[in-house]
Every structure is written in structure tokens, then in C-alpha cells.
Image (cartoon, rainbow, N blue to C red):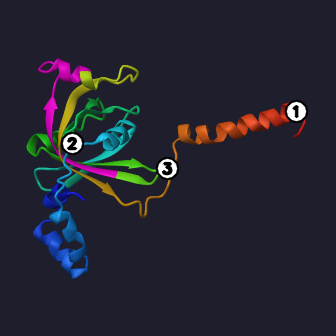
Amino acid sequence: MSKAFATISFTDSVKAAQSRYGSRERNQHFELSDDPRNTLGEFETEFIEARDSFYQATISENGWPYVQHRGGPAGFLRVLDHETIGYADFSGNKQYLSVGNLNANPRVSLILMDYPNRRRLKLWGTVRIVHESEEPEIIARLEVPSYRARIERGIIIHIEAVEWNCPQHITPRYSKAEVDSIIQPLIEEIEFLRENGVV
């Protein structure tokens, strides 16, 4: 269980809600845990580097949350060490909502989904924005040579808390590549049967 997660998330109002709805006692084990769970292990590293997208939440100066979908080729979100991740921020619609929010408040929360296996990893962290003109070596570590998109900046996230979420209510979904890998053996079997006059 994650003590860092509880320290960040279980505010007084959250604890009051837990008490009102009968889950306060059950949730206290997070706060009593000896494991802060604020670093990435091998399992988290493999999971993160296999993702091709995630959801990122930031907070604006006027207090409104903003959630953005970030995507790229699998592995574009890089684990730099056991407490740091980062990604190349590719050129987009030029609204700069997340970047603007992070300039004012560096706190960020990510949700990484594995829909087929019904797994969800939640990360909390603080962000440092880097630019190639100032730190080219960091940008080089975040580059994805096979992905043709312009990098505007790098987003470096220092991990503050890690928490795996329960699979309840996650509907399995599959990408085209995942569906193709599932049906390819069936296509090959059908072709074999046709070639041998069975169908």
C-alpha cells in the first residue's frame, strides 16, 4: 500500500467523505503503511514504457483542473531513473494549456491505462520543463527517432507517489494492432484450410 499516495490525496475533506460513506477505517491502512511507494520498480518501469498514451491532469491559476490525453509511439514516455520519468512534448494545437498550467503550478497527476488487461497506474509528480537550447542532452534522451513530430520541449516529472488502481469498472478495449495480433492466427488457419480444400 502507498503512504505517499495517501499523504497527497487524503486531505481533510477526503477523510470526511470517507467517514460519511463508511470507508474511512478501510482506507487508513494506506496512511499506516511503511512503504511510501514513491519510486518506480521494475514492474512499473515495464508498464510505463509499454504505453502509447496516458492522461495528464494539471491545475490552472484560477483553480480549474485540465485533463489532457498525451500520445505517441509505445515507449515515448521514458523512465529516466527510479524516481523520474519524462516525455518529448510534441507540437500540437498551440493552446499550451498544460504547459501554462505547469508554469504556474508544477504539480501533475497521470493515469496510464492498459485496457486489454484492465490495469491502471496512477502517478503524482512535480514537473520541470526543459528546452533544447538549454538542455540538449535531456531532449536527446526523450527523442523518438521513428516518430515524425516536432519536439517543442521536454517534460521531466519527479515522481512523488505511485499507486495501482483496482480493475473494477475498466472495460477492456483493444487497439488495431492488438486486434490484428489476435486475429492473425485465425486468418492463417483459414488460409491453410482453403489451400487444403477444407473450406
Element on which disc 3 rests: loop
Judge whether residue 174 is colored magenta.
Answer: no
Whole-angstrom CA distance, mark 1 to mark 3, is: 34 Å
The amino acid on which the numbered mark 1 sits, given as a three-letter code, is Asn
Of 13 and 50, nearer the camera is 50
The numbered mark, 2 or 1, whose residue comes first in the sequence reads 2
Q: What residue did someone put label 3 on? A: 116
The amino acid on which the numbered mark 3 sits, given as a three-letter code, is Pro
Whole-angstrom CA distance, mark 2 to mark 1, is: 58 Å
Viewer can see residue 3: yes
Residue stretch rendered in magenta on the structure? 121-140
The reply to whether discs 2 and 1 touch (Cβ–Cβ < 8 Å) is: no
Q: Quadrant of residue 127?
A: top left
Left or right of residue 136, residue 190 in this image: right
Of 32 and 118, nearer the camera is 32
Q: What residue did someone put label 2 on? A: 98
The numbered mark, 3 or 2, whose residue comes first in the sequence reads 2
Query: Which residue is drawn at the image coordinates 14% and 21% (left, top)?
Result: 135
Give the image location of residue 193, x and y in percent: 83, 37
Element on which disc 1 rests: loop
The numbered mark, 1 or 3, whose residue comes first in the sequence reads 3
Q: Which mark is residue 61?
A: none
Give the image location of residue 180, x and y in percent: 60, 38
Q: What residue did someone put label 1 on? A: 196
Q: Quadrant of the N terminus?
A: bottom left
